[in-house]
Amino acid sequence: MQMLQNLPWYGYVILLIAIASYAYRYFKTGKDAYDAPDDIKVKFKKDPNSNLTPEQLFSLALDPVTNEWWKVNTNTLFFKKGIRAKNYIEGWGIDTKEGYWDFANYLKEGGRRWYFDFIYNMVNNDPEENWDELMNQKYGENERAQRYLNFIKTGKVQGILKQKGFITFDSEIEIGVAAYDASVLIGHARRAYTYEIISEEEAWEVIGFATKLAKENFSSWEEFSKSYILGFTLDIRDRKDGYLEEMYGIHTQVLENPASPWNTINW
């Protein structure tokens, strides 16, 4: 205490700065640890009473990443009980049969492909001075379209996917985002069926469309996985709650785990 009393005025300033700096680092470290995403381990749960056909199991395998995030069975059309999952589908604006079909038809008719296919082609084939006019003609004032353009033209999305090990070359993103649309179609069909918004027959009709979309665009799980994670990244990148990193971790496990549907079901 005597030493502190003898400090010159500027010594107190230096001491206060040091204390503030330490406190900032201490609390930031604690916050970063608190905010870190949970380490979700894949389980690939199965219902022993499932009677789905191999073709139906293949279709459900087109949506394994969100399956594992929700911890649902990989071999049943039924999704899971609980208000949390119901809130999720309602969060997409789906709380009626009409709302579900509006969303499903949007994905079937173009979905996120409507954004990516045009913008990727434009960036690679049209002079940059024409982009604003072309974007306005195609999308008008559209926040999602502008986000896709920014991620693609700056190489940000390519950098993210290379850093995560999902692609090796920038040109690999030309594979497009049809897998993401297919996956979302399947996941929402399961949720809508589970909460009795649509019938079992209607759910399988949508899932059949999504399966055809995947088959027409890809020839392997490897291609499908790259397209899925590209679409997911473009769509969810701005979230700040750790969800994106959780899904990256699950995606890696689905790719690598020997028990994964992508490694046990033939394309």
Image (cartoon, rainbow, N blue to C red):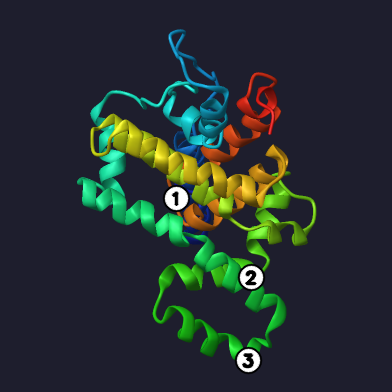
Foreground: disc 3 or disc 2 = 2
Q: How crowded is mark 3: few (under 14 residues within 10 Å), some or many (20 or more)?
A: few
Query: What is the secondary structure assignment of the residue under circle 3?
Result: helix
- Left or right side of 148 for 204: left
Foreground: disc 1 or disc 2 = 2
Q: Residues within 10 Å of mark 1 (few under 14, many from 20)?
A: few
Q: Residues within 10 Å of mark 2 (few under 14, many from 20)?
A: some
Quarter of the image with the C terminus in it: top right
- Identify which amino acid the numbered label 3 is placed on: Glu
Query: What is the secondary structure assignment of the residue under circle 1?
Result: loop
Q: Residue shown at 47%/47% (left/top)?
A: 24
Asked whether residue 244 is in view, the answer is no
- The disc placed on residue 120 is 2
Asked whether residue 119 is in view, the answer is yes
Q: In this view, does 166 lie above or below 129?
A: above
- Left or right side of 49 for 55: right
